[in-house]
Every structure is written in C-alpha cells, then in structure tokens.
Image: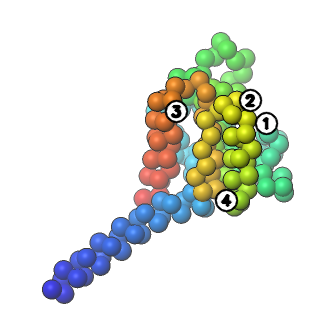
Amino acid sequence: MKKSVLFTFCCLLLFTGCGERKENYFNNPNINTIKNSLTNIKDISSICMVTPNHDPNGNLNDGKGGYNGALYFTHSETDVTSESDTQDACDKGVTYGGSIETYENTKDAKKRYDYLISWGKTAGYTHQKGKVIIRLSTKFSADEEKKLYDDIIKSLEATQQ
C-alpha cells in the first residue's frame, strides 16, 4: 500500500514538474537558446541575431517595451535568392522565413502581438506564447505554417528537458 501511494505521488510530481518547466520556458526565454534550438530544424537555412547596430525594427532594448532579444531566419521553402538581393536573414525580414522576439514581460509581448495582428497577413502569421512572439512568412501555406510553428515549439521545449 505504501509503495503504491509513493509511486503515485512520484508520478504526479514528475508530470507536474515536466509540464511546468516547458511552460515556464516561454515566460523566461533566452534568445541564444532559441537560436541554438532553431539549428535543429531541418529547413531553416540561416539565422541572423538582431544587435543594436543591426536592428531592422529599431525596437531592441528601446526602453519602451520593445524586445530584449530577436532573430530572423530563412527557410528553404520560402528563401528564393533570385527574389532578394541580400543573403542576410535580418535584411530579408519575415518574408523568407520568420522571426522570433523575446520580451521582458507578457504585457509588452501582448502589446506587440496586438500591434502585429492589426496589420493582418501583412505582418505574417503571428503567434504569442508567454514572452515570445513567433512570426512566420505568408509564403507558407496554412499547413506548412502550422508544421513549422509546431516544429519550433517542439524544438524549444526539447532544449528544456
């Protein structure tokens, strides 16, 4: 009897701890960890980290609720070199893959999310998960976009196990 109660307690502790850890990741994201996890996704072809000197939106650590980390990536399904005269994923923007932005708090992430979705599809497919904004190119079909989003989430969660 004691063994079955102990076993049940350990299982509950294990399952609640695992779920909490995954969800907590999106409430305490690290842009470098995100970059590393994206390298595990087969069709992501290049990644550009946003820096103070190379920030297409000018929102990095702006003191006004902008992102505290951001990156852009290209994807082999959408990155057609002949359509773009640059190889830099930051300069290509969301059009040829996507971007991920991290925020100090969920309020700032939500504010950015609301702003982006007010643009409709022009801003790309836009998702918020905790303090993370994930934007994906509208060049993807709905099925491709869902698969890539799911792959990104799985890859980020796998880095926390």
Q: Disc 1 residue type?
A: Pro
Disc 2 marks which residue?
91
Evaluate if marks 2 and 3 touch, with contact meaning CB atoms under 8 Å apart.
no
Relative to 126, does residue 64 appear above or below in the rendering? Answer: below
Q: Residue at x 43, y 63 (%)?
A: 19
Determine the secondary structure under disc 1. loop
Disc 1 marks which residue?
56
Evaluate if marks 1 and 2 touch, with contact meaning CB atoms under 8 Å apart.
yes
Q: Disc 4 residue type?
A: Thr
Residue 97, by quadrant, is top right
Determine the secondary structure under disc 4. helix
Q: Residue at x 42, y 69 (%)?
A: 17
The image quadrant where one finds the N terminus is bottom left
Estimate how packed mark 1 is, as few (under 14), some (14 to 19) or many (20 or more) residues with alpha carbons within 10 Å.
some
Query: Which numbered mark, 4 or 1, is in the foreground of this view?
Result: 4
Taking the image as shown, residue 95 lies to the left or right of residue 44, namely right
Determine the secondary structure under disc 2. helix
Estimate how packed mark 3 is, as few (under 14), some (14 to 19) or many (20 or more) residues with alpha carbons within 10 Å.
some
Mark positioned earlier in the residue sequence (1 or 2):
1
Label 4, label 1: how far apart the Cα atoms are: 22 Å
Query: Which numbered mark, 2 or 4, is in the foreground of this view?
Result: 4
Residue 51 image offset from top left, x and y in percent: 76, 44
Label 3, label 4: how far apart the Cα atoms are: 23 Å
Mark positioned earlier in the residue sequence (3 or 4):
4
Label 3, label 1: how far apart the Cα atoms are: 23 Å
Taking the image as shown, residue 12 lies to the left or right of residue 17, namely left
Asked if residue 79 can be seen in this view, the reply is: yes
Label 2, label 3: how far apart the Cα atoms are: 21 Å
Residue 100 image offset from top left, x and y in percent: 63, 43
Disc 3 marks which residue?
145
Task: Identify the disc placed on residue 106.
Answer: 4
